Every structure is written in C-alpha cells, then in structure tokens.
Image (cartoon, rainbow, N blue to C red):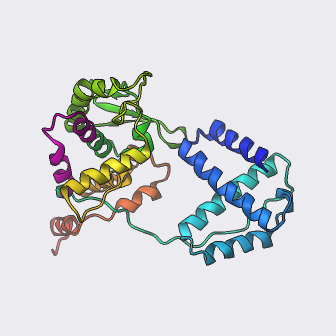
Amino acid sequence: MQPDVDQFLAALQLEQNASPYTIEAYRHVLELWEVFLEVQVIAAAEDVTVDDVRLALSEWSAAGLARSTVGQRLSILRSFYNWLERQGRVSYNPFSAMRGPKQARQLPKFLYEKELEALLESLTGRNEPLALRDLAMIELMYAGGLRVGELTSLSADDIDTVLETVFIRGKGAKDRYVPIGSFALDACAAYVREARPKLLEKQVQETTALFLNHRGTPLTARGVRYILTKRMKEVSHTLHISPHMLRHSFATHLLDRGADLRAVQELLGHEHLSTTQLYTHVSKERLRSVYHHTHPRA
C-alpha cells in the first residue's frame, strides 16, 4: 500500500497545496491503517469491507480515543479511498457511508485583554535578541490572527510597513493580506533591525525566514509553542497559552468591540462563516452593554 500512499500524498500537496503539517498528519493515520490491515490479514485496499471499517471504529473507541481524533481518522481514510476509487484501484469506498461520532462543540479558549497585555508588557523594553523576537512574534500573531504554520512560513519581506499589512500564506492556497497595527509593526521593525541580524550570525546558510531560533535557523511550530509556554510562565503560573489561543483572542476581542462577523471571517481566512461563528461568545459585559443601550425597556 505504500506506493499508493506516497502518490496520494503527492497529489494532495500538488492539488490542494497542503501544508507539511497536514501531509504528516495524513501519513501518520495511513501508517496506522496499514498496521490495522496487517493485523486483520487484509492483503490489499480492495479487500477492505464496511465490516472492517466498523471493527476499526470499535477498536478506536475502546482505546479511548477522543471523538475528534476518530473523526479525523475517518475523514483522512475516506479521502484516501476516494482517491483510490478515482484512480480505479478500488471498486468502491467502504468509508463513504460511515459517519464519525458527533463532535462536542467546544468554545475556543482565549486570553482576556488584561492577561494578554501583561504578557506583552513583560517583554516590552527588553533589548536582548530573543526578547525582541518573542515580542514581535506575539504582537504579530495577535495583530493578524495568524495560525502557527502561517507565522513560521513568513519571509522577512512579507511585512509591508507602508501599507501596514502582512502577507499570509493560508491553508489550502488561500493567501491573504491582513492589516496590522502600530504595536506589531514597531515590534517587528525592532526585531528585524536589532535582533534578527545577530541571530543570523550563528547560521552558516542564508535563510529568508522572518523568525529564527537561537541557532539562527527558521523557527518551527514546536519552537513557537515552547516559547509561548515559557514566556507565559514568566508572567503567571496559572495561565496557559498556545499559538491558537492568540488567534482565538484576536477574533474574540474584535467581536467584543463590535467588529462585523464577515470582516473577521476574511481576516481569519475562514472559508465558511459557520467556523467564525464559534467566536461569537462575547463577554457578559458587552452583552449587558448592548442590551442596556438598545432595548427600549432596559
């Protein structure tokens, strides 16, 4: 099955411009599926039946996998078998009629404005290269609502200081320009001017990546997560942060202050408005304020 997997992943990258993280996730699930087939002594993809899929589902549930994980595996395998069917390598897709467990609808976790301000203030005014980098990184992620993969793929010339925008290479080739404010622009300018050249001194090979690690090589998604956790611990032992929480905070704070939902959708690069609607959990204070200012009997 390995040649089919390699060709499928190559097609996914070529046709959908899938990110390296997506490719890796698909590869991992398909490797697990290959192990399942070996255990069940199923020689080829063509031999898989609906009963085999049901058995896999029951095993995943018995193993205590989260519903989201089961749903992701089903989605990936359904896509793989759809591709096999289009290529004429299987006569039908045993995953086509299977539906994953109903997903629990979870509200996005975000930081309140004061919590985020405390984090940013802890880095403001510090001149060491890594502090300048981390301030620029956090300001930019919050200013533009960037995904971690979008942040790490930025080049040094993707920030336009004249138009005050950042060019973002989004998921599925959905590139976009996002406006950013003066705080992010100033932090990025200071980092590029004072810190990035010092980090580059440690690197033999040139790179166009905007954000670099302490060795002068491009910062990875794992590196960003580590940095955020470390910087938050310097401020609070109870608060936790992830790259996506900055994106959630970006959307939540915009909506709290009256931004149009469709405008936030465009800024986030969401294809469907329903995805953006998760962020409409505005604060009780804003709901109370809107009520008192708009209801005729308030």
Residue 235 in picture, x, y percent from top left: 19, 56
Percent of width and height locating residue 30: 69, 55
Q: Quadrant of residue 214?
A: top left
Q: Nearer the viewer, residue 215 or 190?
A: 215
Percent coordinates x, y for residue 4 in the rendering: 77, 46
Q: Is residue 125 left or right of residue 19?
A: left
Q: Residue at x 31, y 54 (%)?
A: 229
- Residue placed farthest to the left in the image? 125
Residue at x 74%, y 69% (from the top left corner): 53
Seen in the image, is 16 located left or right of residue 42?
left
Task: Using the image, determine if residue 235 lies above or below residue 266.
Answer: below
In depth, the one of 71 and 230 nearer the eye is 230
Image quadrant holding the C terminus, namely bottom left
Residue 76 in the image: state x and y as whole percent: 65, 56
> What residue sits 28% from the left and 44% below the top?
138
Q: Is residue 234 above or below residue 191?
A: below
Chain part drawn in magenta: 115-136
Residue 94 in sight from this viewpoint: no
Q: Can you see residue 65?
A: yes
> How many numbered discs?
0
- Magenta segment main secondary structure: helix
